[in-house]
Amino acid sequence: MANSPSGDSVTDRLVRILETFTPTRTAQTTADIGRRAGLPSSSAHRIVNELVDAGLLERDDERRVRVGMRLWELATRSSHALRLRQAALPYMERVQQRVREHTQLAILEHDEALFLERLSAPDSGANITRVAGRLPVHASSSGLVLLAFAPHDLQERVLAGPLPRVTPETIVDPTALRRTLAEVRTLGRVIAPGYVDEVSTGVAVPVRDETGAVIAALSVVLPRDAETQFALVELHRAARDTERALGYRR
Amino acid sequence: MANSPSGDSVTDRLVRILETFTPTRTAQTTADIGRRAGLPSSSAHRIVNELVDAGLLERDDERRVRVGMRLWELATRSSHALRLRQAALPYMERVQQRVREHTQLAILEHDEALFLERLSAPDSGANITRVAGRLPVHASSSGLVLLAFAPHDLQERVLAGPLPRVTPETIVDPTALRRTLAEVRTLGRVIAPGYVDEVSTGVAVPVRDETGAVIAALSVVLPRDAETQFALVELHRAARDTERALGYRR
């Protein structure tokens, strides 16, 4: 696409505009979008107007700008995320009904755990994950499963640090993390008490494709001192059924 | 954004590229994308490469292009669709568990019913709706609810036709459709036997905001001759609980 005088492409500027919208910042003025995206005011107004005309952004009654339903539709209807979560959803529902705690599906995306789905009963406990939200791979149960089965170079990159401390329980020592990852590969599951949230224990298992490669993690967030065995059995069963629904297992 | 010699903006070309991806066409060559988007080959290659670099599109092992996880993430994490479906999801699960048939959430988007969510048990019957898919408002149960409570000018635009016949049961006569919409407003629900799929009966109810305006439709797809009353009672209960979860009702 055409480049601006500063050399960034229109695609770059589009991405920078979309990145200013977050789960806690869903509506902004065009001036704020421009400032947060580092764009001159005139460029911001022109691009936002074009995106609103195309339906990718929307203006509300107070002239604030939001992500448009059309962008969600285009991004979702043919996405890999949708196929995976639709395959997993009936089995995630079964886990959620039986365990009665938050049940989640995550994939590895740019060295972080990206959550494709989260099911929560009205009475489920604390949970810091969000749909389309991310957590660090070394601190979350889903992330530890994804990291344990990730390509070697990615594992080494994460082990080389930094490993930020999210809670006092987070594994921040590379040697300890390496040991935990080896254990996850041996046992095929992780139990993460308080690693990412002091009041909770995450448990997670891998979902594999037909070659045995891990493509996702299924997890449950339990109260910190809860018994984990029942949740793990249900997660393993859901992972196997998801693999079957995806055609990866007979 | 900068315009091409033909006068269309880069945003237009971006939308045309995204629109070439559909639920049944999730991976394409760059040449096919360019052809389907009506773009010169050199433009298509340049724009697709930029979108791949930005993570909005992805290339698979066979060099085919797919919608990128990053686009899904950016479109989803701050979207209105997500807030509504997260509020409705626990109650949709309850409907799905009790009725044991497909349970759906739809909104009105550009004169069509856009489906934000669909829950299906492994043994649920036929269903033509998809997440991020659309159905005509005059033919689907969700669409009829959304149309019945839509602004007057939108109703008149749809009533002015054309009203395509999807099945022999679809209401294609404007006078009959007007009568049906009045009945939906009076009864607060619709029963649509065979209108969009001959083997199914859709039933749907409205979800309202704090002003009473209808913001979404909750629906269940039943076998054609199934009893509808139990599903409608469960849908009404889910709609009220969703309104409460959104803070629209005490």
Image (spheres, coloured by chain):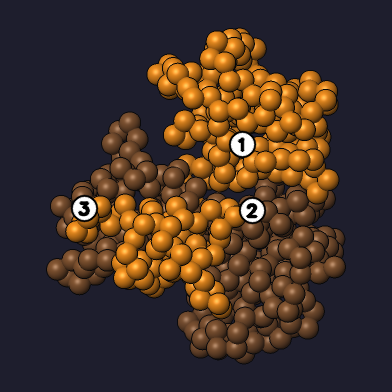
Chain colours: A brown, B orange
Percent position of residue B26, x then y: 56, 60
Q: Position of residue A56 (x, y in %)?
A: 38, 48
CA gap, disc 2 and disc 3: 43 Å
Which secondary structure, mark 3? loop
Whether callout 3 and callout 1 share a subunit is answered: yes
The chain that hosts pointer 2 is: A
x and y percent of residue B13 in the render? Answer: 33, 56
Where is B206 relative to A87, above or below? Answer: above
Disc 3: which residue: B7
Horizontal placement of A25 versus A90: left or right? left
> Disc 3 residue type?
Gly
Q: Looking at this view, is B53 or B230 the one in front?
A: B53
Image quarter hosting the C terminus of chain A: bottom right
Image quadrant in which you'd find residue A103: bottom right
Residue A219 % position (x, y): 70, 62
Residue A205 visible (yes or no) = no
Amino acid type at circle 1 is Leu
**For the residues bearing labels 2 and 3, Cβ distance under 8 angstroms:** no
Q: Residue at x 67, y 53 (%)?
A: A86
For the point 74% across and 31% down, the residue is B198
Which type of secondary structure does the marked residue at label 2 adopt? strand
Dot 3 surroundings within 10 Å: few (below 14), some, or many (20 or more)? few
Task: Give the number of marks.
Answer: 3
Query: In the image, which is nearer the foreground, mark 2 or mark 3?
Result: 3
Q: Which of pointers 3 and 1 indicates the residue nearer the eye?
A: 3
Q: Which residue is mark 2?
A: A118
Inspect the image, locate mark 2, and give the three-letter code of the amino acid beneath it. Arg
Q: Secondary structure at mark 1?
A: strand
* Crowd rating for badge 2 (residues with CA inside 10 Å; few <14, some 14–19, many 20+): many
Which class describes the residues within 10 Å of circle 1: few (<14), some (14-19), or many (20+)? many
In the figure, is residue A182 to the left or right of A106? right
